[in-house]
Image (spheres, rainbow, N blue to C red):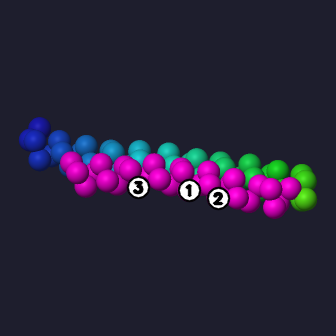
Amino acid sequence: MSPEALLALTKGVTIAIGGIMPAYAIGKIVAKAMESIGRNPESAGKLFVPMLLGAAFAEAIAIYALVVVFTL
């Protein structure tokens, strides 16, 4: 396998894993928050900000993966 092909494969795997896992985490965060709000509607105000922060931190991992791909 040539070095260029190996580099392209590495970039593809990096961005694939770096995109799939944060997307799964964000989906899980939002699903659990909506489930909690469904059980206790009064908690919506208390859950909104932590839910957004958790989603933002999970999205930051995807951005780190994109930066790694650009540096390869």
The dot on residue 31 is none
Label 2 with label 1: CB-CB less than 8 Å: yes
- For disc 1, the neighbor class at 10 Å (few under 14, some 14 to 19, many from 20) is few
Residue at 25% from the left image edge and 43% from the top image edge: 10
Q: Considering depth in this image, is 11 or 64 the residue closer to the camera? A: 64
Secondary structure state at the residue bearing disc 2: helix
Marks 3 and 1, the one that precedes in the sequence: 1
Residue 45, quarter of the rendered image: bottom right
In the rendered structure, the answer to whether residue 46 lies left or right of residue 65 reads: right
Q: Considering depth in this image, is 10 or 57 the residue closer to the camera? A: 57
The dot on residue 56 is 1
- For disc 3, the neighbor class at 10 Å (few under 14, some 14 to 19, many from 20) is some
Q: Position of residue 15 (x, y in %)?
A: 35, 50
In the image, what residue type sits under mark 2?
Leu
Q: Considering depth in this image, is 4 or 29 the residue closer to the camera? A: 29
Q: In this rendering, does residue 21 appear at all? A: yes
In the rendered structure, the answer to whether residue 12 lies left or right of residue 38 reads: left
Secondary structure mostly seen in the magenta stretch: helix
**Tag 3 residue:** 63
The dot on residue 52 is 2
In the rendered image, residue 49 lying in the magenta stretch gets the answer: yes
